[in-house]
Image (cartoon, grey):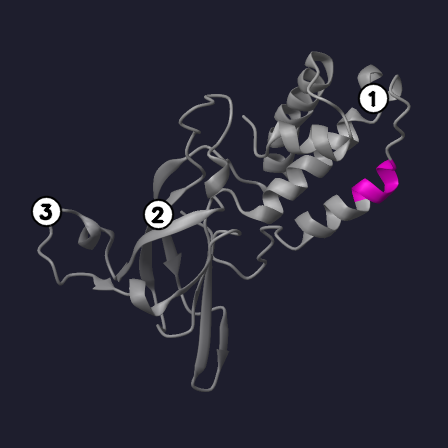
Amino acid sequence: MLLASMTDIRERLGFDDMTDINFAATMALDAATPQIEAMLNTSFTQGSCVETFFVEKPPYMNRQAFRTKFRLNNGFVTLTSVKSAYELAAFSEQTPNGSFKDVTGTVIVDTDRGIVDDINNRYTLQYVQIAYTAGFPVDGVNADSYDLTAIPDWLQQAAKLRAMIGMADDAAVSEAGIKLDTKMLWAQFNALVSRKMRYCPTGRMPL
């Protein structure tokens, strides 16, 4: 699945619309997707998720200030709801409303990294259930690509950089006399991706 436009790579390298370079760019982009998924520890495939956490006490407390972070299993999220309760059964559909507290509107979400940050609710021996959607929809025309309008610009740029690194030794590129500076491309790629790593040492993890 592609995270960026093959045409953008071809034009950036100065090629005309040729079958061999189109194929090379497409294959390099396709290979970049799982590599970036592994680096960011997330899947780009769209889906709905419900994850439950247990908080004994906020990881950070200083007098009246407190803070709890939740690291979701996925990044690139759209939050649906955040609920807290003292018993797991409170989240059941069969349980009357009012047995859990809806705190959705009081949290801050890092949508790209999939981290929910809460400085408004002080959890003590409580369960927190977070529902969300993650990933990107498939393009309506090209089934081998995600919908590029839904993908952040930085992620598209990272995919194109990683693809060009992969194309550095491709015959179609070398025969055209194009020399790609992989050292510079790696530096640009790492600068983009390192800011979005899903590292959150104090974050609560799902049960």
User: Which residue is situated farthest in the top direction here?
Assistant: 19
Name the image quarter holding residue 179: top right
User: In front: mark 1 or mark 3?
Assistant: 1
User: In front: mark 1 or mark 2?
Assistant: 1
Q: In the displayed structure, would residue 175 be above or below residue 114?
A: above
Give the SS element for disc 2: strand
Which of the two residues, 175 or 131, is positioned nearer the viewer here?
175
Q: What range is drawn magenta here?
A: 181-186
Q: Which of marks 1 and 2 is nearer the N terminus?
A: 2
Magenta segment includes 171: no
Q: Is residue 195 left or right of residue 174?
A: left
Using the image, tell me which numbered label, if any, was put on residue 132.
Answer: 2
Q: Which of marks 1 and 3 is nearer the N terminus?
A: 3
Q: In the displayed structure, would residue 127 be above or below residue 123?
A: above
Name the residue carrying label 3.
94
Using the image, tell me which numbered label, if any, was put on residue 173.
Answer: 1
Q: Is residue 199 left or right of residue 97?
A: right
Which of the two residues, 49 or 23, is positioned nearer the viewer here?
23
Dominant SS of magenta comes to helix
Q: Earlier in the sequence, mark 2 or mark 3?
A: 3
User: In front: mark 2 or mark 3?
Assistant: 2
Amino acid on which disc 2 is placed: Tyr
Residue at screen point 68% across, 36% down: 160
